[in-house]
């Protein structure tokens, strides 16, 4: 859980990163930047800032902002009913992002899981994305990602997003943000 003050600070910071990437938001989009700390109260190490442009029954488009070395934890998008699960394409817009998916482990990966949570990161096939590079993640595939030293901005294009159904390897993760009142 984060406070409203922490949320607003992360929103302002995410907006700066988006501006560095040349991405222009409307005032309403900037005010609606989602700040996800995944319920761990460790936003600098485990977290993600998101702008959702559209999310319909057929398509979704988002911007993902990661602060330096910030990690989106390992998860998958499972089948739901007749839907095979979300398929997503990540396209790096600014910075460097290290994406890990199922496959042969990379011998010397560039990312490191947040200290104390190493056991909840199980896939180690590394895909390095720099500006202009992209990678498509099939439905129901375990994956996680971490920004490089300068942070990263990634555009996500996917089928329908239903984040509330995501399955995280770490049982302590809560995907939907909880914002506490400032005291």
Image (spheres, helix red, strand yellow):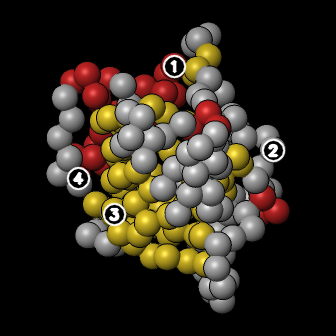
Residues at marks 1 and 3, CA–CA distance in whole angstroms: 29 Å
User: Up-down: is 24 above or below 99?
Assistant: above
Q: Which residue is mark 4?
A: 20
Residue 37 in sight in this render: no
In this figure, which residue is indicated by the disc labeled 1? 4
Residue drawn at 79 percent across, 41 percent down: 172
Between discs 3 and 2, the one toward the N terminus: 3
Left or right of 116 on screen, residue 31: left
Q: Going 50% across and 44% down the picture, which residue do you hit? A: 48
Looking at the figure, which quarter contains the N terminus? top right
Nearest to N terminus: mark 4 or mark 2: 4
Q: Which residue is mark 2?
A: 171
Image coordinates for residue 45, horizontal then vertical, percent: 60, 51
- Mark 4 vs mark 2: give the one in front: 2
CA gap between label 1 and label 4 equals 25 Å
**Foreground: disc 1 or disc 3:** 3
Q: Earlier in the sequence, mark 1 or mark 4?
A: 1
What percent of the width, then of the height, locates residue 126? 56, 77
User: Whole-percent x and y of residue 21?
Assistant: 23, 54
First in sequence, mark 1 or 2: give its number.
1
To which residue does mark 3 refer?
Answer: 92
Residue at 49% x, 34% y is 35
């Amino acid at each position: 859980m984060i406070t409203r003050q922490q949320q607003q600070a992360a929103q302002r910071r995410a907006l700066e990163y988006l501006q560095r990437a040349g991405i222009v938001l409307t005032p309403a989009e900037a005010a609606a930047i989602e700040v996800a700390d995944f319920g761990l109260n460790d936003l600098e190490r485990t977290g993600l800032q998101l702008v959702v442009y559209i999310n319909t029954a057929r398509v979704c488009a988002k911007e993902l902002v990661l602060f330096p070395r910030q990690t989106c934890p390992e998860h998958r998008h499972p089948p739901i009913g007749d839907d095979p699960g979300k398929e997503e394409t990540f396209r790096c817009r600014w910075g460097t992002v290290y994406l890990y998916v199922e496959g042969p482990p990379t011998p010397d990966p560039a990312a490191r899981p947040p200290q104390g949570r190493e056991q909840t990161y199980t896939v180690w096939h590394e895909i390095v994305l720099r500006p202009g590079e992209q990678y498509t993640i099939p439905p129901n595939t375990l994956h996680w990602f971490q920004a490089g030293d300068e942070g990263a901005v990634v555009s996500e294009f996917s089928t329908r997003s239903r984040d509330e159904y995501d399955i995280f390897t770490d049982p302590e993760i809560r995907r939907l943000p909880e914002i506490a009142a400032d005291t």
